[in-house]
Amino acid sequence: MLSRVAERVYWMSRYLERVENAARLVAVYSELLLDLPEDARLDWSVALEILGMGDAWQRTGGTESELGFLLTSKNHNASVLASLSFARENARTTRDIVPSEAWRTINELHMYAVKNLPSMVQRPSSPVPAEIVGRCHKITGILDGTMSHGPAYRFIRLGRSLERADMSSRIVDVAAAILLAGRDEIHLHDSTIWRAVLRALSAYQMYRQYVRRRILGPDVLEFILHDADFPRSIMHCVQVLEESLHKLPRSEKALNQVSALEDRLKGIDLQAVDHQVVHQFVDELQLDFASLHGVIFKTWLNPMSAA
């Protein structure tokens, strides 16, 4: 298949995953702000840090609210509306590859977001994020159930899994950073913060089903990083990346990157580390994800750049 087609479906799936994750994060974080006392001193800047938008928001000089910047900003491609616009454009230009029902559903989601996201800036605890998440799930189901699982689909899986693993690591990283601050008013609510981490990844029910213990930081980290059966765990995402890469040509270098990622994940005992070690470990994981994306880009999406 053409590299430009591979690039478009890869980025379509990454942006859709980013939209879903951001919408879920907004829903969970708005509830967390209500659950924690005022002296915990948390605000929407934490959500911006999770999405990697904190520095960009600072450069605006406060011309947009933090939540408005996250949801509807046209000045950063990680905002929900901007990401959805990019996903829609990539789907539109690959309509001969992507099932028509998926294209229509993506287009309808974009129209829904344009109409409803601005109202969330003043009322974040609205049903809009849940609706966006549900529609993203529908799109994923359409792609999985109606698209031939050939090369184009493999690039969709690569984009989705890499974005999902990156977001899982970001949520863990910021939670560890919050707790690393060491304020007593924060540590009194450790379990509330880790519960929010689980819910931001739609992991709460599966955690309770499989771990069967009260919510403790090391157990949550173990589940999110190492549980190979949970679809949003980092280990599961890495294994999906490996499976998809095995079916693509010239994948040796990318597979070596994935193998190193898997070794890094297996090499840490999360029951015996503190928040500082977790923070550093996740930072290293994120560098690995960026490096893997670079290999994918040079190998298949823009092979001329490797010449």
Image: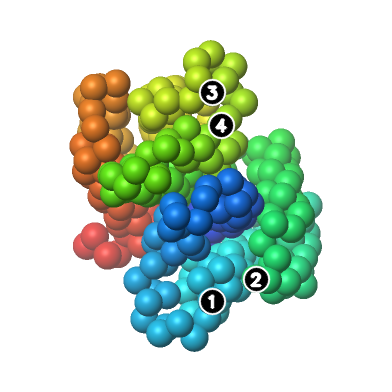
Q: SS for tag 1?
A: loop
Q: Are marks 4 and 3 in contact (CB under 8 Å)?
A: yes
Residue 78 appears in the figure: yes
Picture layout, residue 73 above or below residue 25:
below
Neighbours of disc 1 within 10 Å: few (<14), some (14-19), many (20+)? some
Residue marked by disc 4: 203
Q: SS for tag 3?
A: helix
Residue marked by disc 1: 65
Which amino acid type corresponds to the residue marked 3 in the rendered image?
Tyr
Q: Report how far apart the C-alphas of labels 2 and 3 lie in the structure.
A: 31 Å
Q: Report how far apart the C-alphas of labels 1 and 4 lie in the structure.
A: 29 Å
Q: SS for tag 4?
A: loop
Instruction: Give the label, 4 or 2, closer to the camera.
Output: 2
Please state if 185 lies on the left or on the right of 268 as rendered: right
Q: Nearer the viewer, residue 178 or 282?
A: 178
Neighbours of disc 4 within 10 Å: few (<14), some (14-19), many (20+)? many
Which amino acid type corresponds to the residue marked 2 in the rendered image?
Val
The residue at the point 60 percent across, 51 percent down is: 34
Q: Report how far apart the C-alphas of labels 1 and 2 lie in the structure.
A: 8 Å
Which amino acid type corresponds to the residue marked 4 in the rendered image?
Ala
Picture layout, residue 68 above or below residue 224:
below
Q: SS for tag 2?
A: loop
Neighbours of disc 3 within 10 Å: few (<14), some (14-19), many (20+)? many
Residue marked by disc 3: 207
Which amino acid type corresponds to the residue marked 1 in the rendered image?
Ser
Residue marked by disc 2: 121
